[in-house]
Amino acid sequence: MTGLTVPLGELVTIVEDDAAIAEGLSLNLNLQGYRTEAIGDGETARTRIEETAPDLVLLDISLPKRSGIWVLERLREAGNHVPVMVLSARQDEFDKVAALRLGADDYVTKPFALAELLARVAALLRRARLTRAPGPQPPQLPLPASADSGRGSGRGRRRHGRFCRNASRPK
């Protein structure tokens, strides 16, 4: 099963054995400018993900031949850190926690809201782009231990504000 493709854009691999869901996801992702490849079983998915190096994997858990959990385990064991969003009908907390602990970056239960799913895809891809961006990264300044992040008492916020003002003053 192969989804529609758009020549430009990031590659999203859809690992889903339900052809209607895979085609719907592929079409909607293509409309957002992403290229897609749809794969219907876990065994083929592991091989194709290694061959094509997608930017994101949408991974069902219940698949023929090999489960989505098996695919996820093999990817992480091989050092492949492609972002993985699990799409599953399994709504049990145990399944969600297990997938996230094995290396999934997000877990969405079926049925899902398309707009939310597309927003989550965009967020995962944005985060992935930031972590692999070439060139110098802006320096990260540590906050002092006494700085408050804006929660809690007003004193902490004032201290934090003073720290920021003093840090930007020319010498």
Image: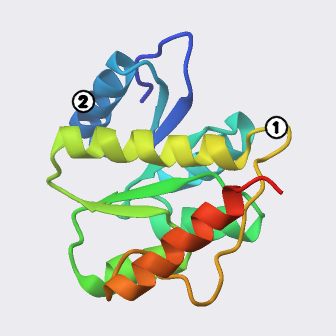
- Residue identifier under label 2: 24
The image shows residue 125, relative to residue 78, as above or below, that is above
Could you tell me if residue 16 is visible in this image? no
Proximity of marks 1 and 2: CB atoms separated by less than 8 Å: no
Say what secondary structure mark 2 lies in. Answer: helix
| Mark found first going from the N terminus, 1 or 2 | 2
Residue drawn at x 30%, y 22% is: 27
Q: Position of residue 140 (x, y in %)?
A: 73, 61
Q: Residue at x 69, y 34 (%)?
A: 52
Q: Is residue 91 visible?
A: yes
Q: Residue at x 29, y 28 (%)?
A: 23
- Residue 63 lies left or right of residue 125; in this view the side is left
Q: Is residue 88 left or right of residue 58?
A: left
Tell me if mark 2 has few (under 14), some (14-19) or many (20+) residues whose alpha carbon lies within 10 angstroms of its own. Answer: some
Amino acid type, callout 1: Pro
Q: Nearer the viewer, mark 1 or mark 2?
A: 1
Quarter containing the N terminus: top left
Left or right: where 2 falls relative to 166: left
> What's the mark number on residue 134?
1
